[in-house]
Amino acid sequence: MAEDLKNKARELLRARQVDLVIGYKRASDGIAAAPCFIDIEGDADKLIWDAYCVYNLSVYLKDFRGKKIGIIAKACDVKSIIVLLQENQLKREDLFIIGVECPGVIDEKRLCFSDRQYQEVDRAIKCRPCASAVPLLYDWLLKEKEKMGKVSEDHDKYDSVRKLEAKSLAERLKFWEGEFSRCIRCYACRQVCPMCYCPKCVADQAMPAWFPKATGDKGNFSWNVTRAIHLAGRCIDCGECERACPVGIPLRDINKKIEKDVKELFNYEAGLNAERKPLLSCFDKTDPADFIR
Amino acid sequence: MENIISKKDLVDRIEGLLKDFEIIGPRELPNKGIFYQPIVNAGDLYLGDSFTVEPVKKYFLSPSEYLFKENLEQGAKPVEELPLPGAGRIIIGVRPCEARGLVLLDKIFDAEYKDDFYTSNRKRSVIVGLSCLMPDKTCFCTSMGGSPAENRGMDAILFSAGDGFIVEIITDKGKDIFGALGSDIGKEEKKAWELDKEKRKGALEKRITAPESLDGTFESVYWQKASLACLSCGICTYLCPVCHCFDLVDEERKKLKCYDGCAFVDFTLHASGENPRPTKKERYRQRVFHKFEYFKKNFGENLCVGCGRCIRHCPVKIDIADIVDKAPLTQ
Amino acid sequence: MKDWEPKIVGFLCNWCSYAGADLAGTLRIEYPPNIKIIRVPCSGRVNPLFVLKCLMDGADGVLISGCHIGDCHYSEGNFYARRRFAILKRFFEYLGIDPRRFQMSWVSASEGDKWAKLIKVLVEEIKQAGPNKLGGRKDG
């Protein structure tokens, strides 16, 4: 299967259909995967495809604007490409999407804690509610050999959000302040997110600054809340932010709350249709107004 | 001086020390990781095999600290320096790589120029180390002149032995804390301990050789390729026991000194709008050169202790050790 | 704590709500002075970050007030605001921020009376909610 992938990459490069193929290679520890940038046919040997390929490679597309890029993308990754197309950040004709049918990737965080030997662990939590292993958009598809069902039947993707919603106001505040207190403002969540492409992030603006650069209740709370607000209607839950966070803040529980509300309030889901106008660039006469006095 | 102590004795001693000292040590937060936190119950201490996410550096070089503030009230001093920390504290569970990191940082903050915040934190802290039993796949301290069993930068160090620990006292500060604890180590036990130390050193799988000099490779296309995967976040810098770049910002009428990193896009942004390190290639090359070339030329050692945090926590598993190991020797 | 008075920040659209608030003044209707008004061209101009920053910097409550649906001076500004702040309202409550602290209203230029009543109710509600402690604790 990986051989088919390598052959496709070689073919694309040989025919000059793309300038670069972005995919996965084996990391230096021999077990995990790492992003791989191939511009010559010979290097296509490095490509791999397995459960360790967790990264959302579409975050690199903005670095190569103007070039023709072949990108290996799982169903979730393709959703972020769709959002980028929707927001005119990419040109469809510059992309050759090598879709991969994905049965779910591993949970890196739990991997680190299990015994130092990378054992077989469950698929990542973010994979469980995955509706379909087949990407919505692709130019070529690498099919999964075995017939695939859903990663996990019967999984409520808003389960942890609901649990938090059920808590009291004071409990929720305490919970979130506690989680944000560990934030070190490394901005990995932002850098790993394909949707965070602002040339000058609001967090980096000084004179005047929106919120403190200092790590402390005010700065940390403001940063995480601001990023979530800026992702409203755009986050497709690739889970990379939570995976990248070195201090284990449950970022998906924040983004999924907004995702849930956006679905309930406006019947909108991000990453499904590149032709549809972005959520906050439009409105509907039936938008709810019960909160307005 | 080495003693053998049981885990219970250690916990009891720490519980007793809580009265007089602030105690900081690793605690496990389920499903999140091991973090240095203030300890209120000695039983909460995690002295197992996994490593903390953040290094002990943050207790000496704070992620954000206020240096001075301005006062607008009548009669108040217009600029008031904020008080230096003074209360005694014990930091326990510090790995040899992190403690050696402090020794490296001393060369910058406690040398010709003495940074008051740093030096007062160093003075008031007792460092109790914890030798590593199980290095993980990203550790390479032995390649950087260190070892999982060494004690540079520490006042005392713990080695797990059976159900308890062997505590090696190194300085007077360490003696004051742990001197009276446990029983003297016997000859047989001492031999076993020496063998154990060698075994721990040997357990490291990852070995790399940093080149003597990277001089002459500055323009090499190697750095372009090595940096393609970098996301320009701050994880490797913030979690490194020896990275120390900082930013000075005016905030809420106070002068703030906070962490900064050469990986960030804006790190070298000038007021004119010019940025001499506009792409990842320049920034990643700078990171490697600072650690393995410039610091070595200025201070004689690599600015790296081989703790592996940068690799372990990099969101895209960039391996700086591997990159340095395979670096070209010429253009 | 007895003499604590809530500080409420109001973002009022120039064409309707600001005029409505002004009308309350012209009509000499009394209402609590706790609201600090910031005039914006349209409720659609209000950035959710304004609301967040107010709450983090010590405001006890934030109010956004604009034209009634269909009456926006710029035709659609308040439609965008309605959508944007529907999300923000629910999100803030999820984070543990008292929902009384962030409110939105449509007040037209002729509704001076409604404005005064609204502020009376708002100040009462925020007095019940108590002083805002968000972001006010140890920093750095």
Image (spheres, rainbow, N blue to C red):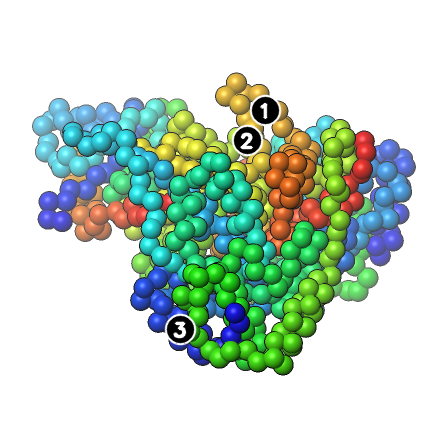
Please state the chain letter of the residue tagged with numbered disc 1 in the rendered image: B
User: Could you say which disc has been placed on residue B275 in the image?
Assistant: 1
Horizontal and vertical percent for residue A133?
A: 70, 57
In the rendered image, is residue B18 in sight?
A: yes
User: Could you say which disc has been placed on residue B13 in the image?
Assistant: 3
In the rendered image, is residue A58 in sight?
A: no
What residue type is disc 3 on? Arg
- In the structure shown, which secondary structural element does the residue marked by tag 2 occupy? loop
> Against B103, is B264 above or below?
above
Q: CA distance from mark 3 to mark 2?
A: 47 Å
User: Which picture quadrant has residue A138?
Assistant: top right
Number of other residues with Cα within 10 Å of mark 1, as a class: few under 14, some 14 to 19, many 20 or more: some
Please state the chain letter of the residue tagged with numbered disc 3 in the rendered image: B
Q: Earlier in the sequence, mark 3 or mark 2?
A: 3
Horizontal and vertical percent for residue B119?
A: 42, 45
Q: Quadrant of the C terminus of chain B?
A: top right
Specify whether C66 is left or right of A210. Answer: left
Please state the chain letter of the residue tagged with numbered disc 2 in the rendered image: B
B19, B237: nearer the viewer = B19
Q: Residue at x 34, y 44 (%)?
A: B84
- In the structure shown, which secondary structural element does the residue marked by tag 3 occupy? helix
Q: Residue at x 31, y 67 (%)?
A: B19
Q: CA distance from mark 1 to mark 3?
A: 54 Å
Residue labelled with disc 2: B266
What residue type is disc 2 on? Asp
